[in-house]
Image (spheres, rainbow, N blue to C red):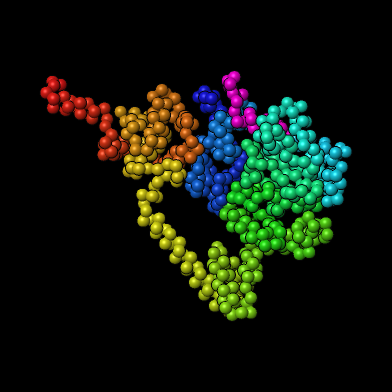
Amino acid sequence: MAFSRAFLDELEARNPIEDVVGHYVSLKPRGSNLFGLCPFHGEKTASFSVAPDKGIYYCFGCHKGGNVFNFMMEIEGLTYPDAVRALAKRVGMEVPEDEQYQSRYRHQERLWALSKEAARFFRAQLFSPAGAQGLAYAQQRGMPKATLTTFGVGFAPNAWSALTDAMRKKGYTDQELIDSGLVSEKGGRIFDRFRNRLMFPIIDVRGNVIGFGGRVMDDSTPKYLNSPETEIFNKRKNLFGLNLAKKSKLGYLILVEGYMDAVSLHQYGFDCAVASLGTSLTEEHAALLSRYTEQVILIYDGDTAGQRATKRAIPMLEKVGLQVKVLQMKGAKDPDEFLKKFGADRFKLLLEGASNRVEYQLNAIARKYDIREDDQRVKFIQECALLISALPSSVQQEVYGNRVAEVGGISFEAMKMEIAKANKNRIRREKKLQEKKDLAPVQAVQPKSRTIRYDDVKSAMAEEGVIGQGLREPALFDLCGDLRASDFSSSLLGRVYEQLRACQSRGLRVELSSLEGFELDEMSHIAGILQRQSGPVNEQAMKDYIATIRAEAQKRGVHTEDDLLALRNKLKESKGYKV
C-alpha cells in the first residue's frame, strides 16, 4: 500500500537516521559524519558512514546505502511497508492502514506470537506427567530448575498432534502452524515436527521466540533437530543464547558448538556463551557478534572437524575486527563435560591461558610436520614465516619469529630473512592485483551491484552529477529545461531524475526518501551517488553535466523535441510541402 508523503515525512523526522543506526552500530564522529563498522559485511576499519544532515547511510566497503527506511529493510530483512511499520512502532506512531492490509509484518507478528505460545506449551509439558522422561534427562545432565527457567527449556510429548491440537484451540490456523516450522505435512495432513524431545527455544536479540532445537530422548535420529528456515528464523543470522550473553559483564563472548555447552557455561557463571544453530559459523554470525563484543574465545571440539571449523572461523571473526582467542581442553571432549569433571575454577584458569589465534595457528602448523626431518623442518619454517609476515606489528613478528626460530633450530637472523622474503612475495602479489585494477578505469567506475551496469560511462557520470547536484540543491533542476529521462543512458538514473524532477516541479521535498519503487541495491547505488558529492553546489557544473548528457544522447540516436521538429520539416521540404 502507498503511504502519504506527510506521514512518511513525519515518521522520518521522528526517527533520525543516526539514532536508528546507532541501535545496531557503534558510531563515532568524524568530520560532519558518523562512522562505524559496517553491519552488512566484515571489516576491521570503519567504512560505514552516516550523514545526519543528508539523512542517509553509506558503506564505502560493500556500497550498501540509503535512507532510514532502506536501513531497516536491510538490517531486519523487511519489505518497505514493514520497515515503515517497524519505525512507526519504534516511536509510537499509528500507521494509516486500509481494510485490505495483509502484510508480511502482520504475518511475522502472528508467527512470533505462535512460537511464544508453543514455548509456553513445551514448558508446561516438561513439568507434567507427559514430560517425566524429559525432566529426568535434564536433571541427569545437571540442569537445576533455575537453569531450565532461564533458558525456557521444555518438552515435546511423544505424540503426533499434542502441540497442533493445543495451538488450534488458541486460534492459530494450520497454515500458520506450517509457516512457523512447528509442524510437518504429509498427504494433506499435518503433525507435530518435534516429538519426544527436550526443547530449547531459540530467542533473538529482541526477545522474540523464532524457532526451537530439540534433543531426542531415545536412539532416534537426528539427535538434535532444529526448526527449518522460516519467515522469522534464519539459522545463518542468529545464535543460541545471544539474547542472554549480550548482557554479560565479562567483556568477551565464548563461542561453542552445542546448546548444552552454552547452557552449562551459563550455569557455571560464564554467562557470555553462545552457540551456532546446527551450522558452521557464517559471516552474518561474525558481524552479529561484533555488535556486542571486541573479543571472542573459540571453544570447538578437539576432533578433526572441530579443528577445521576453528581454522575457518578465525579469519571470519578477525575480518569484522574481533580479537580471537582459542581454548583447547584436555581431559574432556567439550565444555559441558569439563565443567562437570573439574569445575568452574579450573575452567576459568583455562580461559585465562587461552592462546591467541597466532599461537593456535603456529601450533596447528607444527602438528603437520615432523621437524626431525630436514625437508619437513624447512616446510614448517616457510609456512610459519608466511603466517608471521602478515602480522601488522613488527613486535609481533619478532616475538613469534624468535619462537619459530628456536623450535626450528635456526638463527633469528635466518628467520628474519625468511619472513622478509615471504613479505616481499605478498607485496608483489598485491601490487599486481592493484595494477590490474588500475588498467581497468572503466570497470572501476561501474556500479558495484552486479544488477546495475553503465553502457555509456561518460553519460552516466554526468547523469550521476545531475542527480547529486539536484538532490543537494533542488533549484538547479530548473536548468535542465527539456532534458528528459529518455535522454539518460542509464534507465535507473533516468527514473531517479524523473521522480526528483516531478517532486521539485510540484513543490515537494526533493530527497532520497521522495523516491518510490526502487530495489535495495538501487537505493544503495543512489545513496552512494549522494555520498560522493562534496564541496559547494555548482551551477556551471550542472550545465556541463546537462550538455554532456545531451551530446551523448545524440550520439546514441536519442532526439529531443527540437530535433524531431527539424526532422519533420526537412521531410516536408524534401516532398515539396510548404512549411
Which quarter of the figure has residue 368? bottom right
Left or right of 416 in this view: 567: left
* Percent coordinates x, y for residue 172 in the rendering: 71, 28
Residue at screen point 40% across, 43% down: 453
User: In the displayed image of the protein, which residue is found farthest to the top?
Assistant: 99
User: In the displayed image of the protein, which residue is found farthest to the front?
Assistant: 187
Above or below — where is 91 with respect to 230? Answer: above
Left or right of 42 in this view: 514: left
Residue at screen point 64% across, 30% down: 107
Q: Answer whether residue 18 is visible to the viewer in this image.
A: no
Q: Does the magenta segment cover residue 356? A: no
* Percent coordinates x, y for residue 574 in the rendering: 13, 27
Q: Nearer the viewer, residue 108 or 96?
A: 108
Left or right of 226 in this view: 374: left
Image quarter hosting the N terminus: top right
Q: Answer whether residue 40 is visible to the viewer in this image.
A: yes
Q: Nearer the viewer, residue 162 or 283?
A: 162
* Percent coordinates x, y for residue 236 in the rendering: 62, 46
Above or below — where is 441 with respect to 79? Answer: below
Q: Does the magenta segment cover residue 100? A: yes
Q: Nearer the viewer, residue 295 or 362?
A: 362
Task: Report how many numbered discs are placed on residues in the image.
Answer: 0
Left or right of 544 in this view: 57: right
Q: Which residues are magenta?
A: 94-116
Above or below — where is 69 with respect to 331? Answer: above
Residue at screen point 58% across, 40% down: 75
* Percent coordinates x, y for residue 497 in the rendering: 39, 32
Image quarter hosting the C terminus: top left
Above or below — where is 425 with respect to 23? Answer: below
Which quarter of the figure has residue 447? top left
Which quarter of the figure has residue 319? bottom right
Residue at screen point 58% across, 70% down: 384
